[in-house]
Image (tube, rainbow, N blue to C red):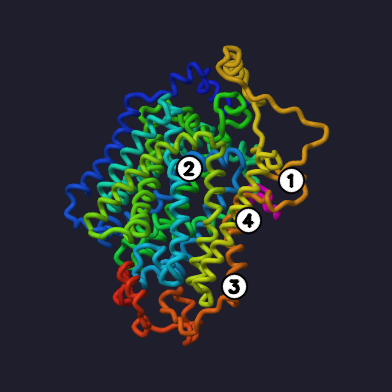
């Protein structure tokens, strides 16, 4: 009998006992309060004591004087939401190691950002990535893509906040929605007061907390499982280390859809999402931005890699003695708090540190999204209808942040009904992420693309993906798709541990999940690892949604570019294209900005967008 299960016998008490263990001690509350207090103090400092001008440039871009390392840490922290800390280990626990290829994809994303996307933003001095689309295509393209950003933010903000509230509720017994109110209020407070500087520096604090926590959890998990050899042995016996190279697009996650889905997802989330672009362009020069992205890429892979390994370690610890089958944990998304209490519950302050880690991840993502969302809503939807002043702009953006904070609290009531958080997130963002990434690529890489091509391609892709997602969800509801994780059991629980669980069942504290009888004729269903149904495009794995969205955009855009031909008089500034594309441009396609004629409408747009000739000056390249 393995030492893993012997150890479990002493840690998995009856739920009545466990309910006492799953309460924060005074030290845990102190650790958690210190994290929230530090975040609030940073907001107070930048809101009241920092010697900075009260301008939108300062509020949104920090006066373009931010430093490389803090921005890198902030970029990492913003991608490590509570979903990453809680749901990624749950994904690995249930479905195995293939999700790790989504993380590895970041290695390929960084060169794409550094050599294709970010140079264009810097050379055109854009502060809002959607502003580029108006300059390259037209105002309608910008408005459509901005609308998708606002829609995604509205859908995802409650999810970002609900996950840590779920963890806190699990270890304290407090009502989830009370927690949501308290922590959302703190986040709104420091984001509203301090702007991008407060967001970045709280991200630094929160990023350090996350790094310490995930490393501690990983190390302690390995030690208490019996060492690295025991982790690998148990994970291998449980099938969690099996690589899936299946070419069937209906298989939930494979090496292929993990990597390609991750490639386009991270490209969209980091390089073409205003919440991250806003931070990247707050650095003084392109050279610093590239360095920051390299550091962020390595940091992301390290922390997310450890986080993925935590899911494998968690499975190895409970191999043959599954708390979910025992009825002690209701679903995979709740496994991490149970695991933390198991391996760290006897260490003073450690549960508080982990919950601080989960909240740090959520707050960093939430604050970054709130700050960028406020800027986008103001400049795209409010400023055109009011008389703009810097004071009025800052006041309006702060009101937007408060309104969205209230929305997060209310939205938590809907999120609590989701079964798989990570599946929900990837599915929702799959509707438009591929189309948005593709439209930016059309602008930077495909000179034939014009405004009509961009708009029609975007609409076509979003409609296709919306239809695909809706039909896919209908297939789920009809039972045609059923994703069940890799099996675990209670067969290897030793006698004392089984006795503890049996006592809990007899006392009606838990209800073990009984295995379903195997039918003589297996049902026709698309499962997580195979399908016995006839092929249907509506049963394709949600991990392919970003890739399909990009392909749909390109399939429309290429032929459309020969139908909606650009006016030969409509020449483009070469700096609107990625550097390596410029040498392929013909003279009639581009001209220098000084040569472009400006009509009255364009002059007006320049004024509205803050675009002038100086924006196209040669960018600064440095060796910092």
Query: Looking at the image, which is closer to me, 327 or 395?
Result: 395
Label 2 environment density (alpha carbons within 10 Å; few <14, some 14–19, many ≥20) = many
Q: Position of residue 310 (x, y in %)?
A: 51, 40
Q: Residues within 10 Å of mark 1 (few under 14, many from 20)?
A: some
Disc 3: which residue: 560
The magenta stretch is 244-254
Residue 297 vs residue 64: left or right?
right
Task: Name the front one of labels 3 and 2.
Answer: 3
Which residue corresponds to the image point at 32% horizontal and 27% vertical from the top-left? 27
Q: Which residue is mark 1?
A: 531
* The N terminus, quarter of image: top right
Q: CA distance from mark 2 to mark 4?
A: 22 Å
Tell me the SS state at disc 1. loop
Q: Are discs 1 and 2 less than 8 Å apart at CB?
A: no
Q: Earlier in the sequence, mark 1 or mark 2?
A: 2
**Could you tell me if residue 622 is visible in this image?**
no
Say left or right for 502 vs 78.
right
**Of the two numbered discs 1 and 3 in the rendering, the one whose residue sits closer to the viewer:** 3
Residue 108 vs 531, above or below: the answer is below
Disc sitting over residue 83 in the figure: 2
> Of callouts 3 and 2, which one flags the residue occurring earlier in the amino acid sequence?
2
Alpha-carbon span between mark 4 and mark 1:
17 Å
Spot the residue most to the top: 507
Mark 4–mark 1 contact, CB under 8 Å? no
Mark 4 or mark 1: name the one nearer the start of the chain.
4
Q: CA distance from mark 4 to mark 3?
A: 29 Å
Q: Which residue is mark 4?
A: 256
At numbered mark 4, what does the secondary structure look like: helix, strand or loop?
Answer: helix
In the rendered image, the quadrant that contains the C terminus is bottom left
Q: Which mark is residue 59?
A: none
**In the depicted structure, whether residue 184 falls above or below residue 605:** above
**From mark 1 to mark 3, how far is it between C-alphas?**
36 Å
């Amino acid at each position: 009998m393995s030492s893993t299960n012997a150890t479990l016998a002493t840690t998995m008490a009856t739920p009545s006992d466990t309910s006492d263990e799953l309460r924060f001690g005074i030290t845990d509350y102190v650790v958690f309060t210190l994290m929230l207090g530090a975040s609030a103090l940073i907001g107070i400092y930048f809101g009241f004591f920092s010697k900075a001008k009260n301008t939108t440039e300062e509020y949104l871009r920090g006066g373009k004087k931010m430093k490389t390392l803090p921005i890198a840490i902030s970029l990492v922290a913003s991608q490590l939401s509570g979903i990453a800390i809680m749901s990624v280990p749950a994904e690995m626990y249930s479905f195995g190691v293939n999700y790790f290829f989504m993380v590895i994809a970041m290695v390929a994303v960084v060169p794409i950002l550094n050599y294709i996307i970010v140079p264009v933003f810097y050379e055109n001095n854009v502060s809002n990535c959607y502003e580029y689309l108006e300059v390259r295509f037209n105002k309608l393209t910008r408005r459509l893509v901005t609308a998708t950003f606002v829609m995604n933010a509205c859908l995802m903000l409650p999810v970002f906040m609900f996950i840590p509230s779920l963890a806190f509720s699990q270890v304290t017994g407090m009502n989830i929605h009370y927690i949501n109110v308290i922590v959302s209020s703190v986040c709104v407070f420091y984001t509203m007061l301090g702007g991008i500087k407060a967001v970045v520096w709280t991200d630094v604090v929160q990023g350090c907390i996350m790094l310490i926590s995930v490393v501690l959890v990983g190390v302690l998990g390995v030690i208490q499982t019996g060492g690295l050899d025991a982790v690998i042995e148990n994970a291998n016996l449980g099938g969690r280390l099996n690589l899936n190279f299946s070419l069937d697009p209906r298989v939930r996650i494979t090496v292929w859809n993990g990597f390609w889905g991750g490639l386009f997802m991270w490209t969209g989330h980091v390089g073409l999402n205003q919440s991250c672009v806003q931070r990247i362009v707050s650095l003084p020069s392109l050279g610093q931005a590239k360095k920051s992205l390299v550091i962020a890429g390595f940091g992301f892979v390290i922390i997310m890699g450890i986080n993925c390994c935590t899911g494998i370690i968690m499975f190895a610890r409970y191999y043959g003695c599954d708390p979910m089958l025992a009825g002690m944990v209701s679903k995979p998304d709740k496994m991490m708090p149970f695991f933390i209490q198991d391996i760290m519950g006897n260490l003073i302050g450690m549960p508080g540190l982990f919950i601080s880690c989960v909240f740090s991840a959520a707050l960093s993502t939430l604050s970054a999204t709130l700050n960028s969302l406020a800027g986008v809503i103001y400049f795209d939807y409010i400023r055109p209808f009011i008389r703009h002043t810097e004071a009025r702009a800052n006041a309006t953006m702060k009101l937007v942040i408060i309104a969205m904070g209230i929305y997060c609290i209310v939205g938590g009531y809907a999120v609590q009904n989701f079964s798989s958080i990570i599946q929900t997130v990837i599915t929702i963002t799959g509707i438009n992420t591929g189309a948005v990434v593709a439209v930016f690529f059309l602008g930077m890489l495909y000179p034939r693309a014009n405004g009509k091509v961009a708009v029609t391609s975007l609409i076509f892709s979003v409609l296709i993906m919306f239809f695909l997602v809706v039909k896919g969800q209908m297939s789920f509801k009809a039972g045609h798709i059923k994703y069940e994780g890799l099996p675990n059991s209670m067969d290897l629980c030793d006698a004392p541990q089984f006795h503890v669980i049996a006592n809990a069942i007899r006392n009606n504290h838990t209800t073990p999940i009984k295995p379903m009888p195997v039918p003589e004729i297996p049902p026709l269903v698309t499962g997580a690892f195979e399908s016995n149904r006839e092929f249907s495009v509506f049963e394709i794995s949600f991990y392919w949604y970003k890739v399909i969205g990009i392909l749909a955009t390109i399939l429309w855009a290429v032929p459309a570019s020969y139908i909606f031909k650009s006016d030969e008089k409509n020449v483009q500034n070469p700096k609107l294209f990625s550097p390596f594309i410029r040498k392929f441009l013909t003279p009639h396609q581009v001209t220098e900005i000084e040569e472009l004629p400006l009509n009255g409408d364009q002059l007006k747009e320049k004024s509205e967008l803050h675009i002038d000739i100086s924006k196209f000056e040669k960018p600064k390249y440095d060796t910092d």
